[in-house]
Each structure stands twice: as structure tokens, then as C-alpha cells.
Image (tube, rainbow, N blue to C red):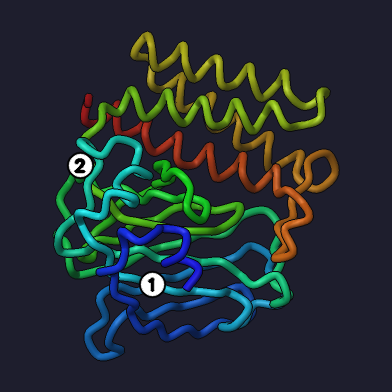
Amino acid sequence: MAVLLCLGSGLAAAQSLPVNVSASGNHAQVVIGSTSQPLAEVTLDFQDATGLSPSSLGVSAQQVDLLDTTLLARLPDASLTTLPSALPLLVTIEPPASGGLSFRDTGRLEIHTHAIPYSLGSSFRVLKAPLGGAFRDVTDEIAQGSVRARTTYGGFSQFLIVIDLRSTGAVISEKIGWLQGKVAALPLAERAAFNAFLADVQTGVATGNYAAALTAVDGFRARAQTRSGNFLANEWRATRDVTNHAGELVAGANTLRFSVAYLRDFGQ
């Protein structure tokens, strides 16, 4: 119901899909659609979760209207980012505040589907958005089988697989800008080192020195991991009363790395 409300009346034709959720320890599995012939399977692997259960995860899924104007307005570019007609799927992971779920650092999410075909250099991407908010690219891997779309998360909300035909350079700039915003929210003493890494990424991409750009991304990520806990807040809680700074930085670095490597390998 929350998804329908936040997307507005344009989703009147959206269809809720059955979800079968299993979860324990640091692992959760979600089967969307028929259990014998699922539309998609979503797996989540946490580094360090507490209180993980099917009910505390808060998963729902919908088959959405490809022409829904409210949803299209949330995409980065409605003319260049489009939903695949074979998989107009919106997955919402919105743990209830009273459910007791928390985790430290990051987790890994994979959407596996046979509904769309894999090809090398595919333009399929994972997008993420807060409830009712703007979607952004969070992809850190597109793999075979038929398609396995993967991302790292420091928090949750809504996920789509789309076809993204934007220039990779523009996507890289967007991801760097997002990370710069996250760095600006850190304690003052932490900002300079992270901003220096991002400046090196920009220089490497601008000059075509992708090895240097990737080294800078890796340095950014390693610093976030090293500073996690003692210097950077690193916990996400369903009560939404803390910010997982370290987890968000690591997740942002992973998706930035994907785009820089994609530009290096495919030049677009």
C-alpha cells in the first residue's frame, strides 16, 4: 500500500506480485511471482545484521505500468532510461521501524531473472530510490545467468532494473557528485582525504587514465572501510535514527568503480 500511495494515482494499473521471503543470520532470499516459475529472485547478504527475518525486511514487489508518468518522472532521464517491457518490476525493501532490523557497514543485493537476456557490455542497470524519490544508478555488476544485476547497499528503499542509454561519462559525473554530497555530511576532519580521492578520479577519467581513476576509487573505498566504526558511523537501523556514513561511501565507491571500468572497456 505504501508503494501505491507514494507513486500516486498513475500506478492504478500496477499489479502487486506475490513474494516468498526466507531470512536468517546475514542472508535473505526473496522469490517474486510463482515459486515454480518466478519472475525474479532477490538475494541480500549482509556483513553484520541483527534481527533479520522475513517480517523485519519489509519486502514487496509490483509489476508497474510502463507508461506511468509519475514513475517515469523519477527516472534519471525518461528518454534514455527505460523499463524493459519483459521486466517492469519495482522491488521495495522498506523495513518497518518496529521490526528490529539493523546492520553494520554494507550488504550485497542481487536481482536474478530469466525474463531478460544477458549480453556482454549490457546496458541493463540497477536503479535505487527512496520511497517516491528520484532513482539513481547503483549498479556494481551485471552478470550472466540470464541476468544477475548486483549492487551494494548501505540502506534500502526501491529498486528497478532499467535499460540505461545515457553516456557513461555523464553517469560517472552524477556518481561523483552524489559521493561529494555524502562526503560533505562527514565530520570536517574526514572530508579532505575523501575529496582528494574523488578529484583524482575526475582527473583520471578526464585524461583517459582509467587505471589511475580506478586506483583512486579503490583508495576511497579502502579509506571508508578503514575509518568505519571508529571515525565514521557505520550502522543502519530500521528506526532511521542514525546515518550509515561508511556503508553509503563504500556502496557509492563500488558503483562508481563499475562505471569507470565500463567506460574503460566499452568506451561509451
Disc 1 from disc 2: Cα separation: 27 Å
What residue sits right under mark 2 in the picture?
Answer: 121
Q: Given the image, on which type of amino acid does mark 2 rest?
A: Gly
Left or right side of 143 for 251? right
Quadrant for the C terminus in the image: top left
Under tag 2, what secondary structure? loop
All told, the count of numbered labels is 2
Q: Is residue 147 above or below residue 54?
A: above
Left or right side of 180 for 188? right
Q: Is residue 52 above or below residue 176?
A: below
Residue 67, picture quadrant: bottom left
At x 54%, y 24%, the residue is: 216
Nearer to us of marks 1 and 2 is 1
Where is residue 155 drawn, in percent x and y?
60, 55
Under tag 1, what secondary structure? strand
At x 61%, y 28%, the residue is: 181
Q: Is residue 96 above or below residue 116?
A: below
What residue sits right under mark 1 in the picture?
Answer: 61
Near mark 1 (Cα within 10 A), the count class, few <14, some 14-19 or many ≥20, is many
| Earlier sequence position, callout 1 versus callout 2 | 1
Q: Given the image, on which type of amino acid does mark 1 rest?
A: Ala
Where is residue 46 drawn, in percent x and y?
60, 65
At x 47%, y 53%, the residue is: 132
Q: Is residue 215 above or below residue 96?
A: above
Q: Which mark is residue 261?
A: none
At x 64%, y 72%, the residue is: 96
